[in-house]
Image (cartoon, rainbow, N blue to C red):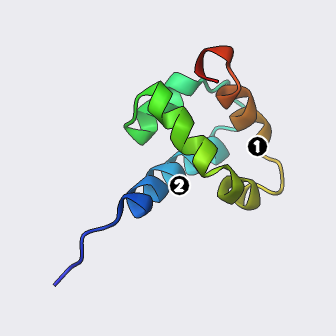
Amino acid sequence: MKQKKTTQEEYQKCVNKVVDYINLHLGEEIDLKSLAGISNFSPFYFHRIMKHFWVNLSERLLSGRGLKQLHVCCATPTFR
């Protein structure tokens, strides 16, 4: 019998999709609304989730390839 995934696991799955997207589109301009759409959350809620997972993301993106773009996206004044 399968166990239901926890909220944390569901959020992690969405965050992983976003990180994968960023890694595949490093040379492109990516905005917060687009990333929120990929995660299936509103821009406001997506921003909150990303702040929560920031430590894990920084470890995954330690090379810095997508970290700069993600930081610019999540640092927009509207969603602070």
Residue 40: x %, y % from top left: 37, 37
Q: Residue furthest top?
A: 78
What residue does disc 1 label?
Answer: 67
Q: Using the image, determine if residue 56 lies above or below residue 77.
A: below
**Residue positioned 48% across, 58% down in the render:** 12
Residue 31: name its quadrant.
Answer: top right
**Residue positioned 43% across, 41% down in the render:** 39
Question: Could you say whether the residue bearing mark 1 is in a helix, strand or loop?
Answer: helix
The CA span between labels 1 and 2 is 14 Å
Which label number is shown at residue 21? none
The amino acid type, in three-letter code, at marker 1 is Leu
**Residue positioned 66% across, 47% down in the render:** 23
Which label number is shown at residue 16? 2
Image-based side of 9 in relation to 48, left or right: left
Residue 38: x %, y % from top left: 44, 37
Residue 57: x %, y % from top left: 67, 54
Q: Nearer the viewer, residue 7 or 73?
A: 7
| Quadrant of the image containing the C terminus | top right
Q: Nearer the viewer, residue 35 or 4?
A: 4
Badge 2 local density, few (<14 within 10 Å), some, or many (20+)?
some
